[in-house]
Structure formats: structure tokens, C-alpha cells
Amino acid sequence: MKIAVTTPNGQVGSRVVRLLLQAGVRPTLLMRDPAKLDAQLADRVSTVRCDQSDAESVVRATEGVGALFWVDPPTGAENPVEGYALAGANAARAVRENRIARTVFLSSVGAEKRSGAGEIDGLGRTEELLNETGAHVLHLRCGYFFSNLLGELESLRTDGVLRTAMDIDEPMPWVDPRDIGDVAAARLLSDVWTGRRVQAVHGPEDLSFSGAAEVLTRALGRRVRAERISDDALRERLRAAGLGPAQVEGVVGMTAWTRDGFRAEDPRTVLTTTPTTLAAWAHAHLLPALRAAPAA
């Protein structure tokens, strides 16, 4: 079976590629720029130049594919929800026209809301579009990535503060992207599941930001505290980073909905619980990053 992987250099996609190779599969990688492929993989994979925002490109790149790992790629669109939905529509067209038997889609907790979750609404629309193909589709609704903490390096390094616009005392699932890749690869290699399905990927435990700060304090050997910032303060940070109005609201919306008493549609079970703890991930990734010299 020919298995295609999008965003193969991403945190999840790169793990999927490695596991497929170890399973004896030669995956086909859909890449905007194949020159960016890790040189160690060049002789072990097939690459196809593909712009996921272009429908014809996606259809051509997935000819003969039996299983597809689809990630709505980071979008530079002024409206990120529309950007994700466009990519999702391209995936759905490819699934139909190429009769791709199984698709595993990287979605998110909150996509079940369908609206009111900021950028995640675009993932919810992609779920709907893939479901409408009638093919076998699995949506991985993932928790909060541990790796998001790498965006707070300066604050953690200088004053030991973990800032967020979310409720710092509300527990939620946190997950290692590597573990998501494990689940995705296992599903891509299996031909026993059918229909339109959802599998949440919740990490080992639910943590609030305050609880995460306690874990980081122990793991990093330095005091870390969580601090809630206002939506307007978050907007200021995003504008300073160069984001446009709709992009800013897309990010703000991803935090605002978590404060409205939302409860995920998919409960934590043995199937949704993955092994890597925040402490283990912090030792392996966050601590070395904090010790590295700040960028000039």
C-alpha cells in the first residue's frame, strides 16, 4: 500500500515518516520544497512537489495513494480559518478523485465545536469535508502540544513565568507531538478500521497551566509560575509579531473558547492516553533550549 505523508518535516509528520520506514514502508512525502528533506532519508522515501493550497497539485501528488496522513499546513492566509478550510477541501477532492481508502487527519480538541474556537474552526471544517467523501477517515483530536512551551523561552529564561490567556487553573490534555506521530503511524499501517472515526490523543494526564508550572519547576530546577494575561495583552503580543487582524483573532479565539466551560466530546480512555510526561519532555527538549544562548 502506498502511504503519503504531508508536512514530513513537522513535529508530527517527521515522526510518522520514521516509523513508516522502520515498518518497512517507503512513504511518499508531499513537500512544497523537496530540497528541504533530511539527506539521510533521501534514498528511503519518494518525494513529490506539492503545494497543499493548490487543489490540482494535491490531486496529482496523491495519485495511486492508498492511505494519506493529512495535516492542514500552517497558513499565511489573512483569514487562517479560511486557509485551513481551503486545504481541507483540497484533501477531500484528492480523496474522492483518487479513491484514497484511508485518511488520518491531524485535528484538535475543540474541532467538534465547528465554530467559536478560533483557528481550530478550520480544522473542524476539514473534518466535515473529509467525512463527506464517504471514504474511511480518522480524525486525531489532539491536546495542547508540549512544544508550544518553546514559544515562551524568553519569558521562562528571564523571569520564570509561563504566560497564557487561558484559565491557568482549568485542567486540559497536554501531549507530546512525538506520541501523536506514534498513533498516526499505527493507524496508517492498519487496514482493519472503517468508516468516519475520531480518536483523541490526550497525553498522559490533564494539567492546568498552574499544574504545568509546578511540573516544570521540578523538571527544570528553577521556579516557574503561571500567569494569566488578558486577551488584549495577547493581541498586543501577536500584533507585535506581525500578525494581521484576522490572524490575531484566530489565535485569541483558540484560547477564549477554553474559558467558556467547554468539555471535550471525546473522553479520556486507555486509547487516548499516551505515555510521555511533561517532565520527561521538558528534560529532553525544554531544558537544553533554555540552556542554549539566546538568539542575537
Image (spheres, rainbow, N blue to C red):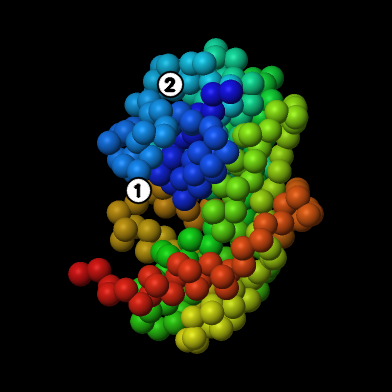
Q: Is residue 144 visible?
A: no
210 over 23 or under it: above or below: below
Indicate which label's residue lies in the foreground, 1 or 2. 2
115 over 285 or under it: above or below: above
Report the front residue among 70 and 191: 191
20 over 135 or under it: above or below: below
Q: Residue furthest top?
A: 97
Circle 1 — which element? loop
* Rendered location of residue 102, percent (x, y): 64, 26
Report the front residue among 230 and 34: 34
Task: Specify few, some or many for label 1: CA neighbours under 10 Å numbering under 14, 14-19, or 20 or more.
Answer: some
Q: In the image, 74: left or right of 254?
A: left
Query: What residue sits 40% from the left and 83% below the top?
Result: 159
The mark found on residue 244 in the picture is 1
Report the front residue among 17 and 294: 17
* Rendered location of residue 139, percent (x, y): 65, 38
The residue beneath circle 2 is: 61
Tell which circle, 1 or 2, labels the residue nearer the N-terminal end: 2
Q: Is residue 270 visible?
A: yes
Q: Amino acid at mark 1?
A: Gly
Query: What residue sits 44% from the left and 74% below the top?
Result: 287
Query: What residue sits 46% from the left and 45% below the top?
Result: 14
Position of the C terminus by quadrant: bottom left
* Rendered location of residue 190, percent (x, y): 68, 33
* Rendered location of residue 211, percent (x, y): 63, 76
Query: What residue sits 43% from the left and 65% below the top?
Result: 150
Q: In the image, 51: left or right of 131?
A: left
